[in-house]
Amino acid sequence: MSVIEELSQLLFPTRCFGCNAIGISICSNCRREWHPHFYTTHIRGMKVHSAISYSPTASRIIMAAKENGLKGADQLIIDAIVHVLDTANFDAFNVRLVPIPSSGINQRRRGRSFILELCREISAATSIPLIPALTINRKVKDQSSLNAKSRLTNMHGAFSINTNTYPRGDLILIDDVVTTGATVAEAARALNSHGFHVLASVTACLAQPLR
Ligand SMILES: [Zn+2]
């Protein structure tokens, strides 16, 4: 450890992203809730594979990464998605990763494009090429308080295909959480309607939708 690292540990000790306990970036209690599995759900005929069942612990880890930009929390999400990609055993020569972009407002507030940045590391770890083919073309509401039907309306037509990308092969959409699937369904619709082929989606977490 360098002097600067030692000093920063003293001033800002590592805390568990799940419960804030001082020590390591994820404690053994939270690790039980953040332990990558392989769940498969179906959204409009598309397979969605996820690693972690959403919980308050998972929510805090996602927030630590997304809203606070904590690298250790990023890494937990990256590892979860890589685990799912490895388990699904896609043909790495024929698939491409397509990140689901966040809205412009969120990108500016966070100072980064969250899923895109994670996807760069996921691509490096899996050797699956990354194609940032999607952009959000208008304002969308935060979906956390919306039910399934309002989410579909909220996302409809929200994605455009980047003009300078031509994603070949089978596309795998990447996002942090899937809830009702409105976002991945709309992203898949946008890509498929342009003649591309979305094979599946992969997310770190799988949440129960609001009814
Ligand atoms: Zn913990």
Image: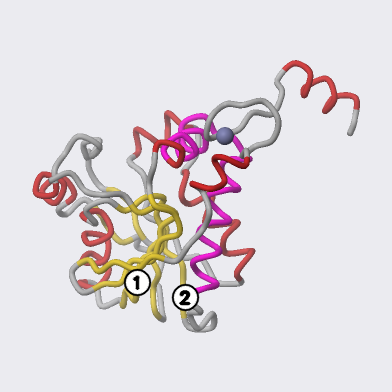
Instruction: Say if 107 sits above or below 77 in the image.
Output: above
Please identify the quadrant where the N terminus is shown. Answer: top right
Q: Nearer the viewer, residue 55 or 191?
A: 55
- Image spot of residue 85 (x, y percent): 50, 69
Residue 8 sits in quarter:
top right
Q: Quadrant of ligand 1?
A: top right
Q: Position of residue 59 (x, y in %)?
A: 41, 38
> Which residue lies under the disc numbered 1?
200
Which SS does the magenta portion mostly show?
helix
Label number found at residue 88: 2
Q: The disc labelled 1 sits on which kind of residue?
A: Ala
| SS of the residue under disc 1 | strand
Q: Residue at x 35, y 63 (%)?
A: 163
**C-beta proximity under 8 Å, tags 2 and 1:** yes
Q: Amino acid at mark 2?
A: Ala
Q: Is residue 86 magenta?
A: yes
Residue 70, above or below 11: below
Magenta-highlighted residues: 59-88
- Viewer-nearest of discs 2 and 1: 2
Name the secondary structure under disc 2: helix
Asked whether, in this view, residue 148 is left or right of residue 127, the answer is: left
Q: Position of residue 210 (x, y in %)?
A: 17, 44
Q: Is residue 191 above or below residue 59?
A: below
Q: Are there few (<14), some (14-19), or many (20+) residues within 10 Å of tag 1?
A: many
